[in-house]
Image (cartoon, rainbow, N blue to C red):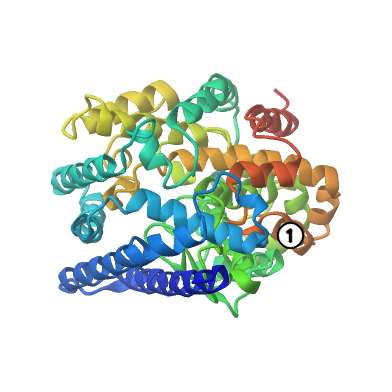
Amino acid sequence: MTREKAFQRLEAIDREVVMLEHMHSVLSWDQEMGISEKGLEERSVQMGWLSTQAHEITCSNEMGDLLSALDANRNNPEGSGEDAFERALVRLRFRHWDKHRSMPSSLVKAISEKACTSHESWVEARKQNDWNMFKGDLQEIIALTREKESCYRREGFSGYDVLLDDFEVGMKGSEVEALFSSIKPKLVSLVNTLADKNVDDDFLKVDYPIAQQQEFSKIVLQDMGFDFSRGSSSVSVHPFTSTLGSDDIRITTRYTDPSVLDSFSSTVHEGGHALYEMGMNSGRKKGTSVANAASHGMHESQSRLWENMVAKSEGFWTHYYPLFCTFFPSQTEGVSLAQFLQAANKVQRSLIRVNADEVSYSLHVMLRFELEQQLLFGNLSVDDLPEAWNKKSEEMLGVVPETYAQGVLQDVHWSSGDFGYFATYALGNLYGAQIWQRMQADLDVDSLMRGGRLSELHSYLDERIYMKGSLLLPGDLLVEATGKPLDANLFTSYLDDKFSRLFGY
């Protein structure tokens, strides 16, 4: 087989796999948004079957032969003459084949089915505030995750690193720990300083009609560049973004949180994810594995950048606050822009990660990062997890959850077996701050926001981040976009600058 024929076949297989992944997303979306009470058992089988099909295709002998013909394991993939898309696709398919082929299809099926059913037990346990309803499922998920890790394990690559690599390719837990340790004291100090500020945000917690919230949010999403001919916005228990197809990218928010800006922030956050998905799914990449983010941390950098650096800034609200006031005149009566900005950026010792302020958010992530390592590879038992959670919450955030729903049951990720995922949320803050710094050097960002010209921010990010997809590894993409490797201190410097101007500490 010629190299050209081998690559054509590889691309055809990859497109088939992506189609299966999109089908899986359709079923997952339907489950999240309204599956019948008795439909779960069959749905878990359906999703398990799809996961098994994709696994068997991507780890088949044919895939191994194609990758061998394409010399996928060569030491110098840049020097073979093929274009960036071809290099990336070969790299992605080899990485997946090399790592996952040691995992039996039966385990893939078991993990997928269990993730489906345990998600529902988590939803009910959270609703009932009953840890015992979910505890057994979590124990099973942990056992399956340990079994998966043993399949991936090899010299120099085991334990938590194996799981983290699924979300942040090439990064080790020790690297994340070093990054987090370098900024954790500063974050704790900032929270302690800013949480004691007397900021009145009660006006954000009165009744804001949902219809008007949705209308205002839609205007902002459109200005950001969200293409409603390729996506939609809905309501769910836990805000999320799902790519059901290359031109069917859906976001959700919720309107049950106490502050109107919690819901708005969720919408902008998920909108940032969606812009990335829409940008990646373009040109030749569309419908292939290259139309994926460089990493989950890089994906999160864009949702966090739009949510916090754009949509909680003075420049943004200088333009949008008058419009916000026309939608909610009684709620904002007598509230100046300066008061609104301080309320929007209020720092507090809070319990819920998704509603956490920009300063304390990463501490919420570090709590989970530390606990899941102890849970999987340390001596922390599932029975002791709620108490350990509460203890770390008090140490790191200065608050103790009063209920399981406020603490150990608040996040969906462990119910799906997504261990290694949480770290990427805080890594997103670090990537985002560095990209934001470079963008401010290249554009008059404040002036663009004051003029409501969010589309120009979108165009900048689309060219440098979104349209790149997985053409580059995350570290290489960051260097290309910003001119330097990751520097965690840029995030705390950004926070210092912003919050000192807002609150004068």
Observer-nearest residue: 504 or 280?
280
Image quadrant in which the C terminus is located: top right
Estimate the x, y position of residue 1 in percent, counting from the top left. Answer: 48, 72
Q: Position of residue 226 (x, y in %)?
A: 63, 69
Q: Secondary structure at mark 1?
A: helix
- 480 up-or-down from 25: above or below: above
Please tell me which residue is depicted at 62% across the width and 30% down the height of the picture: 488
Determine the image quadrant of residue 97: bottom left
Horizontal relation, residue 114 to residue 430: left or right: left
Q: Could you tell me if residue 260 is visible in this image?
A: yes
Asked if residue 338 shows in the view, the reply is: no
Residue 369 image point, x, y percent: 39, 33
Above or below for 364 versus 344: above
Residue displayed at 27% across by 68% down: 47
Seen at 60% across and 63% down, the residue is 86
Q: Is 254 or 490 nearer to us in this picture?
A: 490
Q: Which residue is identified by label 1?
A: 463
Q: Is residue 498 above or below residue 129?
A: above
Q: Crowdedness of circle 1 by 10 Å Cα count: few (<14), some, many (20+)?
A: few
- The residue under label 1 is which amino acid type? Glu
Question: x and y percent of residue 74 in the render?
Answer: 54, 48
Quarter assignment of residue 35: bottom left
- Point 18% across, 42% down: residue: 143
